[in-house]
Structure formats: C-alpha cells, structure tokens
Amino acid sequence: MNNPETAPNPKSVRQDIDFYKIFKVFLSRWYWIAGCVVIALIIARINLLFTPPIYQTSGSLKLQESNPTINTMANAPSTQVYNYTDKIQAEGFVIRSNDVIMNAISNIDYKISYYLKGRIRTSELYPQKPFKIEILQQDSVNFDRSKYYVEAINASTFALSLGEKGAKNTIRYGEPIKMGNMVFKITSPIPPGSYSFKFNTKEDFVGRASGISTGEAARFTNIMYISLTDANPVFAADMLNAIMKEYVAYDAAQKRRSASQTIEFINNQLKLVNRKADTAGNKLTDYKVKNKIIDLGSSTQMDIGKLSDFEKQKSIISIEMVGIKQLENQINNSRGKIDINMDLEGNVGTLLGGLISQLNTFILSRETKLTQFRPNSQPIQELDEQIATLKASIRSNINSLKERNLKTLRYLDSQIGQANQNISKIPSKERDFVQFQTNFDVNNKVLTYLSEKKLESEMNAAAIVPGAAIVNLAYPSYAAISPQPQRLYSFAAMLGLACGFGLILLVRFLNPYIYDKETVEALTNTPIIGVIRKFPEYIDKDNRQALSLSKPKSVFAESVRSVRTNLSFLASHKKSKTICITSEISGEGKSFVTVNLAGTLALIDKKIILIAADLRRSKLHKVFGSNNKVGLSSYLSGQKTLEEVLIHDDVHNIDFIPSGPVPPNPSELLHTDAMKKLLEILAPQYDYVLVDTAPVGLVSDAIPLIRQSDVNLFVIRSGKSQYRAAAIPERLSREYGLSNMAIVLNAFGDDALHSNYYTTDYARGGGNSTYYYSDYSGYAGSGYYEDPKKWWQFWKKKDE
C-alpha cells in the first residue's frame, strides 16, 4: 500500500511579486495605521499645549570702518582693508561678552519677575506688574530665589507661601514680610487668579541673554544682523535693545581708552620736560645775573638757534623711540589686542597702522573660534599662522622705523657737534652762557611741542564716535518660531504613518506561523489538495457542527467539498481508499478535518468508517456522543472484538471506532499485526477508511499507519502551524519512500496581513499543480454562499 501510484518528480515553484497583495497587506490593517496617526496627532496636540512658544526678535547694527580725527585729511585715501565677515564674527563675540550683557541687564527691570498660572502652563507676565512689590531690605547675594505663590483672599488680605507646597501665611496689604532672607511688602491689591513672583539678580538673566546670535545681514556689507529668542517676546525685544545700546557705548569706551593712554603718555613726558625746563631757566637766570651778561652777537645767536633746533629734534625722536619700544613689547609679549599709544610725528605710518588693525581683527576672530574649536584644531592653527605672519611684518616695520630714527639721531649728533665747534671759538663766559641758553631753549621748545600734541590728542578723543551704530531697533514679534503647529502636525502625521507601516512590517517579520497556501508552496514540493476555510461560526467543543456540515451553502462547506473532490485524484486505481490524517502537533485540526471529510463523503452515499487511532488524546468519541470505555485499544489488545468496538451513526450514516482507554504502550499496539489486519478487513467493506492519528511531530505512533495507508493527508492550520511544519511531509516521503503525501491547509481566514507578497504558478496550471483547489478568496459576496455579512456591509439585507 506504500506506492499505489507513481507521481512525477515535483517541479520547482515559480513565484512572482504581486503588488496588489503588497497593497492588501497594508490595507488589511488600515486601522492600525489610522490609530498610529491619531495617537501621533494627539501627542502633538498635547505637546503644543504644554510646550511654551518661543519668539524671536531681531535688530541690526552698522559697523563703522574708522573714526574721524582732527588731523585726518578729508581726501586722504583709506589704507585699511576690512574683511566684513571676520569683523562681524569678532564683534559678535564682544556682544556676547559678560561685560556687555551684565551692563545691559542693569538697564532693564530685572529685580522682580511675575508669573500667572494657567490651566496648563505658567506664563511670565513681563513687562506687566499685576501688583506692586516694594523691597525694604535685601541681602545682595544670599536671598531665596524660589517662587513666592500669592492668592487674594479679600480686599485687605492675601495668602503667601514660599514654594508651591510651602505653608500659606495670611498677610495684610502693606505689612512688611520677612521671608527668604529679605524684607518686602505688597502694597497693591492682587487680582483674581494664581500668581507667583521671584526676586532676581543680574546673573539670573545671563543665560537668557547669552542666546543671542549674530551674522551678516547681507554679503559684503558691514551691517550686522542680531537676534534673540525667548519665551517672552517683550523681554526679548527689551533685552536685545539694551544689549545693542550697551555694545555701542562699550565700543566707544574702548576706543577712547587708546586716546587716553596717549594723553597719559604725553602727561608723563610733560612732567619730565617741565622739571628740566625749570632747572634750565633757573640756571640761565643765575648765570646772567652773576656774570652781568645782557646779550650776544648775532652770529652767536644764530649758532644757538641751530643748536637748540637740533637738540629739540633729537629730544622728540628720543620720545618717539620710547613709544616704539612700548609697541614692540606689546607685539612680543601680548596675545591680546594691540594699542598704538603714540604717533607724535606720524612716523607710525598708515602701513603699520593697517597691519596692527588687521592683527587685532585676527586676534578677535581667534577668540571667537576658540568657543567652537580646540586650540590644536585646523581653523585655530591657520589663524595662529596668519597672526604669526602679521607679527613678523609688524616687527619688520618697527625695525625699519627704529633704523630710520637712529640714522636721524646720528645726523643730528653730527650737526650738533659742528654747532658746538663754532660756539667753542667764542670767549668762555659767552660759551657757558650759550650752553645754558641752549638747554633752556630746547626744553621750552619740547615743552611747547608736547603741549600742542596733548591738545591735539584731547581734541581727537573728544571727536571719537562709536564703531557701531544702531540701524534697526528690536520690536516684539508675537509670531512664535517654535513650536510651529502646522509643521508639528505634519511631522506627527508622517511619524504616525511610518509607525503604522512599521508596526505591520514588524508583526510580519516576527511572525513564525503559516497563513496561506503560497507560504506552504514556497516551503515544500508536497502538493496541496485543498484549502479549508475558517468555520464561519463558533464551534462547540465536540465538533458536532462539523459532522452535520451546518451551513451547507457557506464558503466553508464548499471548501470541504473541494478537498473531497480532490481525494478522487489520489490512489484513483483503488476502489477502497485508506486515508491517514495527521499533523505536526495537536490543535492543528486533524480531527476536525477528519470529521468534515467523513461528513461530506457520507453525503454522497459513500460508505465511511472513521478510526480514532490517536490512542493518547483522542476526542472523536465526543462528536458521536459516545463514551470511550471500549475502542481501538481494546481491540488491538485482544480484549474486545471488532463488532464490540464498532459504532454506527444512523443519523450521518458513518461507522466509527473510538480510541478506547489510553493504553500504557500506544505506539507498540499500532505496530502490531492486529492493526494491519484490521485495515485489511475494513478496506473491502468501505469506500473510505479514515484514520485519525496522533501528531507526528510529538510521537511516532502514526508512522506504521502512514506506511500502510493509500493516501496520507498532512494538516497545516493557518495561524497555528509554524514554518517547520511544511517540511515534515516531504521528509516523511523521503525517509519512507512515499508518494502519497498531500497537504490540507485548515482554518484559512484570508488574513492579508500575513499573506505572502508573491503569487505562485499553481493558479496558471504550472509547477506542482496536479489537483484543482481554491481558497475561495474574494468569492464571499458573489451571491452563491450564505456567509454572515461583514460589519461594514450595512446596506445588505439578511435574505440577500
């Protein structure tokens, strides 16, 4: 009975991607996608309700290229080249400095902040003051910065607590309050509502003001765009305006500092020259009185004039060398901004001034980039190389300037020596007088020169204007930049869609079960002779509905008939067929399929006997309403005869042998000759002998029955059987040389979520398509079946 017929070698299955099936996979769980979108939108809405809006305000500054000076010629060409991008970046660092921000905070009302608690969030009321607070005494450092919560009780009293959960104190208006290491009082009535306030220092606002951002308003312009974001638009505008005004004042103060240093330098030189001039004048007067010298000859006076001029020039150059030495020390020893303290004769020329200005720009740019990069990073190293190159150029200019002054000093010394030779020819008294007169004239001329330079420097300092001017003041903007509802809702919808699609893909990816025939066809070459649909109603525990084939016009009933029809193709040369039904594990519906086949075969007047060969856990006797006190185990053990264990169901015209009591050796009983002889006895008497066996994946009881049967049906249950189950029929065929294995897919529910996205070539008559079968998907609404209508088919009547 092993090889009743020879089947051709199975061909491999060709599979093609079916895009409509892919669409149906996602459409089958559209409510998952819709649910994820709805949940995402709800979360977005909650986020909008609880997230305070952020506002942005902006203004602009114009950075001046230079400062006017008294001695600057109107038509003098500008020799300084500005890199606006670097300058704006450098000045942005200055704007965000602590000095500028702290001074700007001093110009706004920062000492007390008021808050109003709403239903969802608390809002700052700046610049509004719902009630007046007067500070009587406050420790400038150690005072409590927690919130004070107040609520009006009546026209004369209110409740106050330090912290939201602090003890509430009833206080009268105008009464001094000692709390939080300070003394204050509330002098005006508190409006209805839940208010709170807190006391601040300037440091509490540094964080809010430090979020300022700067940039170029347009390329290749000296207009700086400056903006500030904050949860309070009015505070942002006031803070930004205060910062811009303070920056302008700070810049002017920095520029005046250089002029002040020049004036201080001249004052120090004036003190020294004054002492020399006084000493020289006193000596000249004493010598004239003592020697009664009234006047000198014209030639002598001419020599004295030349000598005093040369000495004056020498003194001025010596003063310039002091200033040059100071500049050289700054270049060699300082890594900060360089200030030119002295340019008495314009000898520190425009080229050197331009180089120093460019050096200062690079230094500020380096300080800015150090907030973003490490000192050993590539951008900082490039700036260090540029700074080193500029310093080398400046040192070269300073050396050239020093060498030129030294040459001038040598020339003056030669001229002074020649004048002294001429003077040495006059009498000794007159010669000494000339010496005193020369010292006196030189000191007076240098004193006059320094006084003129001091006046000029003071006039230049008075003419200095700030290096920046406010172009546009900031105004409150009430259009929130964050969060943006439209963008947030769009993002939430897209995220919901992604989560919905991802959830479907995740469930499919984690699914270990077989759901449709395409999956079975892809896993094995064993043919499928039918797909039994899921039973349309609840099945009682005894499966009697299946035996009576209730709902004969349902899709389920038709799918069972399809399996019955395909059985005729198996062992077709046999007049009587022994059919063994098994599965991998229990619960896959092998007994259910057996009962259904028995019922549908009996309806076409076939003589049927059903054997419950699962000697361990059979429940088939409950279908027929009989007990299980005697049965197959009793017959095989020789305790009962065949007539004593055989049950005839007259209602369904089916004979039935129950499994009987559970024996201690079920596998051994099924391997006996008695079981083989039983099948040989029953085969001639019946058209179909249906044997319900134990699961082959759990026990080996069914193996001898499988080898003796004409047809072996392996039941795979949709949504219950795992992928490994599909390989068992092929393995059994290979191990025992069987060609009569076939698969029945049971309880198919047409769940598109787990269906494969490809279509095999069975539908086109190719591959292993030896039998006709259908899963009846899409035919439920054709009018030929009496299946219950779907919940959404509200327009259909019951009789349709």
Image: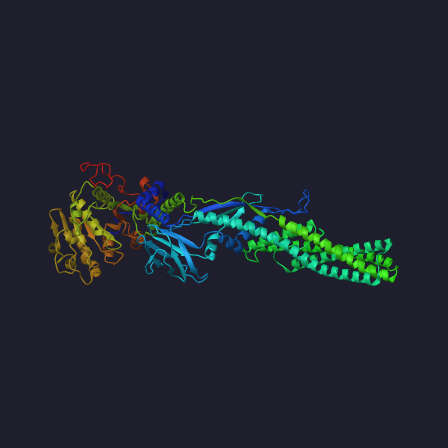
Q: Nearer the viewer, residue 661 or 222?
A: 222
Residue 223: % across, % down: 56, 44
Task: Name the residue: 31% across, 40% down.
Answer: 763
The count of marks equals 0
Q: Judge from the rendering whether residue 778 lies leftward or rightward of residue 124; answer left or right.
A: left
Q: Judge from the rendering whether residue 756 lies leftward or rightward of residue 609; answer left or right.
A: right
Q: Nearer the viewer, residue 38 or 74?
A: 74
State the scheme by which the image is colored. Answer: rainbow
Judge whether residue 651 can be spotted in this image: yes
Q: Judge from the rendering whether residue 722 lies leftward or rightward of residue 230; answer left or right.
A: left
Q: For the C terminus, which image quadrant?
A: top left
Q: Nearer the viewer, residue 541 or 305?
A: 305
Judge whether residue 657 can be spotted in this image: no
Residue 269: % across, % down: 70, 58
Q: Judge from the rendering whether residue 120 lies leftward or rightward of residue 351; answer left or right.
A: left
**Which of the 4 image quarters holds residue 613?**
bottom left
Residue 655: % across, % down: 14, 50
Q: Nearer the viewer, residue 460 or 50?
A: 460
Residue 414: % across, % down: 82, 57
